Amino acid sequence: MATEAATRAVAAPRRRRRTLAWIALALGGAALYVHAWRDTHSSFGALLTGYHGMADIIRRSYPPSHHVLADSIRASIVTFDTALLGTTIALIISLLIAPLAAKNLTPNRVAYELSRIVIGVTRAIPDLIWALLFVTAVGLGPFPGVLALGVHSVGTLGKLFAETVEDMDMGPVEALRVAGASRTQVWLHAVLPGVAPTFVSLTLYRFDVNFRSSTTLGLVGAGGIGFMIYNSLQLFQYREVATELGVVLVFVLVVERVSTILRSKIV
Amino acid sequence: MRKRFGAHEVLRGVDATVRPGEIVCVLGANGSGKSTFLRCAVRLIEPDEGTIELCGVELGSVKGKQLRAARRRAAMVFQQVLLVRRRSALANVAFGALGELPLYRSAHEELFPDEVIERAHDALRRVGLPDVAGQRADRLSGGQAQRIAIARALCQRAELVLADEPVASLDPRAAESVLALLADVAHNEGLGVLVVLHQPELARRYSDRIVGLLEGTVTFDRKPDDVEPNEISNLYRNETDGD
């Protein structure tokens, strides 16, 4: 009985402290949301008045214009190509950078820190900003989009590849190292076969993301369907916008579906 | 050889020799430093003090390419079978020859020289598994996989095999066959074999010498017949007390 009383005496203050912590957490969370709402000038009133504007745009978008269908498909293929090349560039650079950025394989501290800086910088700057920079550097068109996606995706793919390598079973690596294999041979024969399914899956997912991103990049002059949508919006041609968005939607769904099927087959 | 991890000294002056054509078993309780000793022997872990002479090369004095060349003379067979799971048994055996191949002949299995592939087939025959060449490594049984690891050592043309509890995860029959193979490799191929084991009976039957390791020091290093049963039970005293 004495023990039970003592346990209760200890448990009661602990329960009170936990309750107070929960209340503080709830209040803190609420304050954060209130701040975010005010900071972004969010307003239910604006949402209600904006409803009429949106309804007007939808009404003016119907029926979609079939005149731009062929151009929309061609521009979407350009967007697809942009994503394909951008992702491939990122894949190649990430495959080179991952062994340096993985703690368990990196040859030395300097290589590790440098590769992590490259990954950090490329990821921290959004692809839209990269696109603006590359448009300034190499001019308008899809090529700056390819470069923007390629550079930004090094940050994400490189990081995910390095983390996959860090989590892998190091047994085969040790076994080949003892057999006198060089770093490159260890990478080719002990690391890649083990992580390849994950790498493929991550790359397909990244391609999926990049395809959607490359439609946005068109808005800043990096070509493709995004550039067409931007131009149609500028000219208030909402029926053309409807066709272009419809084509984008079909492409996104097909790319997403194919990449999901490929991922499930490979992994 | 001495090795310390933080405040804990794992190896306190371990001294051992393995000669060509000899199989030596290291016995010791968990934490006695057996695996650390094996890894230090090929500098997978850097020892703090001491010298390692591997087939006439002082390992402490070499690095880079020279270290890789020296390491090629030793092969390791691990407790967990360390094969590349998504590659064939034959490719895993041929990987033993990677250290002697230039990159352009080793970037892919298809580029391996015919001589290496033939040597890998030969190694598979020598370990009694010529029929599994095309099977993926992750479809082999535990005993078969350990035999493949030994075949890799043969393909490597190693002069010393270091085996870290190679039968720990095998059933008794497979364990016997793997140890018999290691003894055969030592006695008939002339390789030196150093095996870390937890089974004193197997050590007595298959080794030419037994080294007892207790808390990082060698307590005996003798022929199996000269080792007293109580010397072996002393090695595991603390483990039993702990239970």
Image (cartoon, rainbow, N blue to C red):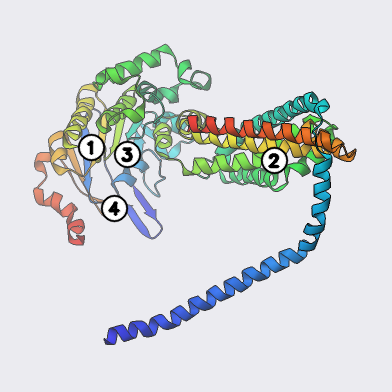
* Residue pictured at 63% horizontal, 31% vertical: A255
Q: What element does badge 1 sit on?
A: loop
For label 4, the residue is B31
Against B87, residue A235 (above or below) is below
Q: CA distance from mark 3 to mark 1?
A: 10 Å
For label 1, the residue is B170
Q: What element does badge 2 sit on?
A: helix
Q: Chain of mark 2?
A: A
Query: Is residue A164 among what the camera can see?
Result: yes
* Residue pictured at 35% horizontal, 58% vertical: B8
Q: Are marks 4 and 1 in contact (CB under 8 Å)?
A: no
- Nearest-to-viewer mark from 4 and 2: 2
* Residue pictured at 45% horizontal, 41% vertical: A168
Query: Is residue A147 among what the camera can see?
Result: no
Q: Tell which of A105 and B12 is nearer to you.
A: A105
Q: Chain of mark 1?
A: B
Answer with left or right where residue B61 lies relative to residue B134. Answer: right
Answer with left or right where residue B103 lies relative to residue A217. Answer: left
- Residue A26 appears in which quarter of the rendering? bottom right
- What x and y, as percent, mark residue B141? 27, 30
* Residue pictured at 70% horizontal, 29% vertical: A80
Q: Tell which of A162 and A205 is nearer to you.
A: A205
- What x and y, as percent, mark residue B165? 26, 40
- Nearest-to-viewer mark from 3 and 4: 3
Q: In the drawing, what numbered circle is on residue B88?
A: none
Q: In the drawing, what numbered circle is on residue B80?
A: 3
- Residue A229 appears in which quarter of the rendering? top right
- What x and y, as percent, mark residue B239? 21, 56
Q: Residues within 10 Å of mark 2 (few under 14, many from 20)?
A: many
Q: CA distance from mark 1 to mark 2?
A: 48 Å
